[in-house]
Image (cartoon, helix red, strand yellow):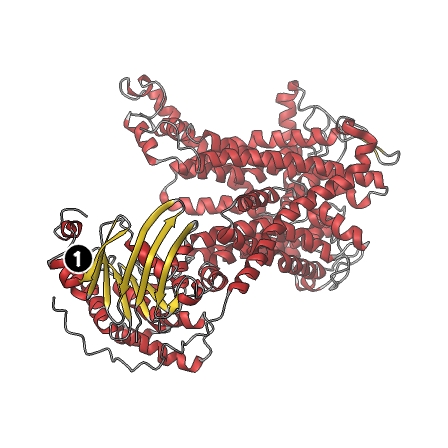
Amino acid sequence: MGVGIKVEHLNAWFGKTQALHDISMDVPANRATAVIGPSGCGKSTFVRCLNRMHETVPDAHAAGKVRMGDVDVYNGTTAVQIRRRIGMVFQKPNPFPTMSIYDNVAAGLKLNGFRHRHRLDEIVERSLKLSALGDEVKDTLRKKSGASLSGGQQQRLCIARALAVEPQVLLMDEPCSALDPISTGKIEELIFQLKEKFTIVIVTHNMQQASRVAEFTGFFLLGKLIEFDKTEKIFTTPSDKRTEDYITGRFG
Amino acid sequence: MPGPQPVAKAEVVSNSGAPSEPLIKAGSSHIADRVFYFAMLACGLCVLALVGLIVYELITKSSLSWRAFGWRFFFRSEWDPVNEQFGAWPFVYGTVVSSILALLLAVPLAIGVAVFITEMCPRWLKGPLAFTTELLAAIPSVIYGLWAIFVLVPLLRAYVEPFLARYFGWTGLFGGPFYGIGMLAAGVILAIMVVPIISSITREVMTAVPQQQREAVLALGATRWEMIRTGVLRNARAGILGGIILGLGRALGETMAVTMVIGNRPEIARSLFAPGYTMASVIANEFSEATTDTYLSALVEVGLALFLVTIIVNILAQVLVWSVTRGAPARGHA
Amino acid sequence: MPEIAATSEFTAGPISLWRRVVNSLVTCAAAAAVFLVLLPLGAIFAYLVYKGISSLNWAFLTQTPKPVGEAGGGMANAIAGSALILLIASAMGVPVGIGAGVYLAEYGQTRLGDFIRFTADVLNGVPSIVVGIVAYAIVVLTQGHFSALAGGVALAIMMIPTITRTTEEMLLLVPNAVREAAYGLGVSRWRTVLSITLRTATSGVITGVMLAFARVAGETAPLLFTAFGNQYWNWKINQPTAALSLQVFTYAISPFDEWHRQAWAGALILIILIVVAVSAVRLVAGRGMLKGAN
């Protein structure tokens, strides 16, 4: 089962430029939470702070408190360890180009010292099923390289890879923006099913997508969290004028 | 907002890996990361250490000769191991003359080849032609030398040198007896060896000139050659010069082929037919037979000078090439 | 506006006959240059084959040199010696070169990194005879005798800068998205570099190694007073050792016809080995560095 994430007074910088200002948010467990806002508002930065990927950029740092369940993400554990419990799917699908489909899915386990080789088959199969890719690649698991699939399939492969290590939270940074509508639809279906096992945070610039898949939504603007509430409320009766302007298309 | 119906395919297997027991041992990789970093750093520092070592060894092992002869070492002509009198001027002269001769022959050829491949060649021929010129660069020096001794030198002796003596002897450059072996042979074989470098750099900088430059000149009604001259070569000038200087650097340090055909006599003569000696050749020929410490030290000092000269030349060349391919954009774009 | 010569040169009236003639002449000159450059290339290969083949026989490949004046004998020990020296050189040069390349690509965006890059380029330009002097000073002088080890050290010094720069280049070609995917899975930095980044760039890195190998395989100057040469078989790294390039040189400058013939044969073998290495490099590089990646 997934766990929730509690964010308190999170600030983030790229060098001297501050990208996030005092964000506080409660991401509920086993739900999908959407993060929306215009370009450059800090939504990707926010999500990347949750699994400490923000630190991989040179000169970038963050301050504040992020708790995943009862684990303090910044002070209670290392970045490497927390990333094994929070999975991430990126905007552009990035399967490992020299590995087969099987090896891609198993990569997270193998590279982290997974000891039970005999269970790998089972886990790979299950992950591929979870990401709805299983049937399409059943026969070519070991023969085809991860990069030879179509865009939508590659993204589902990346989802399978992220799921194989059994994280508790899955972060998705605009996972469908590089995909065609049909693949997008398949991935949105996926999110519905994944919600039962994982907590999902999905960044999206597509408001319709947010209203389709997420129970909760947070609206970001210029590095600040403007409003966070049930999706239904955000899209029908937002409290803040800026939210309303964004929803109705006045900017962004 | 109703969502699409969940597809029946995905079975949600009851979670066998409960979150309290993660699949992967959560070990700390911090130590391993640091060890890895230091190991890689050590390899990088090795590169620095090697150059430092080279400088150190060259300086210390040549100090004997330096103390004995000082600066004049490079301006004296006496090379007499028996009496321990050493002067490196003939080698400096030989190195400079053979390299300049090589460049005089190589530069027009190399630029011609580069121009042909880049601007005039049919598309299907480009690849194979480029590959074959690069093949020239892969031939080892000793094989060039072998071919030079048994093919080039007889050719020079039988046809080229008599021709030059008869029609150009008045210049004073082509006088005296000719045996084929000598400065001219060294210059020719060096030229052949240096063409691929100059040509490939020239090609690289010519290709780096943006297409708009060519089109702008063509649109004004220029012929192809005029377009190349003003639209490409002029813009790539610095880079081509860099390539030439890089070729010079290669020619200065070239050892085997030159040793095999230059005659190896520490003499200075005006005629290109006469034998000569280069800095690299004297080291190659006499190092393992240097009997005394001073002798060896003198040779190392020659090596040190060679090292310094080639370093400076190479750095100059790199700066020039860099300025065209990656640095300042080509002058004169809108 | 692009800077060009005075426009009247190009735009005054129809193209004059003179300009067209010059254009054609230049094209001919360029083609002639190509011909003149390819001529020696063809001649060298032709002579190598023509003169080398006739002396190439089984005895040549399996025997050691006969004493001066006697016919027959071969360069078997030189071929083996070259292999030994190259093995030693690779054992030292390849790991250090790749390690330095990894450092530059993954940790080298600093002043120190720039300095190392610059130094590697400097090292690349050091004449091979000077490298020989240094290897002599470090190994031969300390040990008191010539050796295959000394030759290996000299060649390793020459291999390192090439391998370093090509490894760095190939690693930098790996898209950052691939690294991020690994970090996102909680893979540690060192593991990512080794198992993901380096693995993705493998064929390119191998290309660099083989290029460096091909370059030093034909070197003679640095071996002149390090490995020194040997009439007999030698497998010990601490003894003077024969090398193919050395043997070709010694025979070529000798006054004996028999040795001249063998020099051609030896040169032919040497060039075959190098062409094979260079072509293999092209084959590997042609197949693309990243399988299936865009």
In the orientation shown, which residue stands out farthest toward the right? B83
Would you identify the image quadrant in which residue A7 lies? bottom left
Would you identify the image quadrant in which residue C83 lies? bottom right
Judge from the rendering whether residue C20 lies leftward or rightward of residue B82; answer left or right. Answer: left
Tally the marks.
Answer: 1
Q: Please report, as a chain letter, where disc 1 is located.
A: A
Judge from the rendering whether residue A19 lies leftward or rightward of residue B184; answer left or right. Answer: left
> Looking at the picture, does residue A187 appear above or below residue C153?
below
Residue at label 1?
A207
Residue C81 location, x and y as percent? 70, 59
Q: C201 or B119, which is in the foreground? A: C201
Q: How crowded is mark 1: few (under 14 residues within 10 Å), some or many (20 or more)?
A: some
Can residue B167 be seen here? yes
Q: What residue type is labelled 1?
A: Met
Q: B254 or B56, which is in the foreground? A: B56
Residue at horizontal 55 percent and vertical 57 percent from the top: B37
> Element under label 1?
helix
Judge from the rendering whether residue B291 lies leftward or rightward of residue B237; answer left or right. Answer: right
Residue at horizontal 49 percent and vertical 35 percent from the top: B321
Judge from the rendering whether residue C227 lies leftward or rightward of residue B45; answer left or right. Answer: right
Residue C33 location, x and y as percent? 48, 35
Residue C12 location, x and y as percent? 28, 17
Can residue C42 be seen here? no
Task: Point out the image quarter for the N terminus of chain A.
Answer: bottom left
Residue B71 location, x and y as percent? 76, 28
> Looking at the picture, does residue B175 appear above or below residue C116?
above
